Image (tube, grey):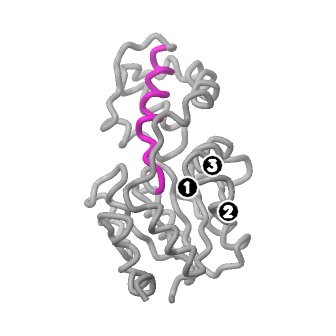
Amino acid sequence: MKYTACIFDLDGTIINTIHSLTYTTNLVMHQCGLDTVLTEEQMKHIVGDGYRKQLERSLIACGDKELTHYEEALRIYPEVFQQNCLYELEPYDGMLEMLHVMKQAGMKLAVLTNKPHTRALDNIKAVYGEHFFDYILGEQEGIPKKPDPTGVFHILKKLDIQPEQCLYMGDTNTDMRTANAAGLDAVGAIWGFRTREELESFSPKYLAERPLDVLEMIGLREDKQK
């Protein structure tokens, strides 16, 4: 087997968080006095680059083009998100089976996300339990956000894995740029928040419509049947 590890994005890759992200962001917008209701389709293009950029894009989409409420939204968001970050979370169809097959094959599994670190831990614990992944790294001081590859290199060092041994799986251009910058083979997760065309434009090694398709692509489906 070529790959001995995989680093996953969180939102739109291993967990469908669009309900919680949309619900939370709308609560913040309303507390800032904005009446526009952002849709889940809008949010799929707003999120992915950390909550500061998420709030900036959301305010603009709600008509606050001068970002008058930006500092207020930054102040409100952490508490609102802490209270609602588990709202209607769900794993994507086939994701749990794919992850179990990878683990059974001896692969180390890690998560790298621009979601605040504590909330990332909360999300993953709610869906997969506390010790399912070998390493989890969310947004925190001292490590630049994706697409900067620093987080990838940090995880590789922690897991004692070489770049050529590790796969990177994500659903946005930010993830594809991260994988390319770190020199990792990428899987574009078409089941997530963005389009095939967006992912394809970054020439990932693999493009997958469903999580279980990945097993066949990396040679694990046959192993599972033996």
Q: Quadrant of residue 95?
A: bottom left
Residue at 73% x, 47% y is: 141
Residue 56 colored in magenta in the image: no
Q: How far, Cα to Cα, is label 2 from label 1?
A: 16 Å
Which residue is identified by label 3?
125
Sequence-first tag of 2 and 1: 2
In the image, what residue type sits under mark 3? Answer: Lys
* Residue 146, numbered circle: 1
2 or 3: tag closer to the N-terminus? 3
User: Residue 117 location, x and y as percent?
Assistant: 66, 46
According to the picture, the residue beneath numbered tag 2 turns out to be 135
Mark 1 Cα shell of 10 Å, populated few (<14), some (14-19), many (≥20): many
Region in magenta? 14-30
- Marks counted in the figure total 3
Q: Could you tell whether 15 is left or right of 117 in the image?
A: left
Of helix, strand and loop, which one carries label 1? loop
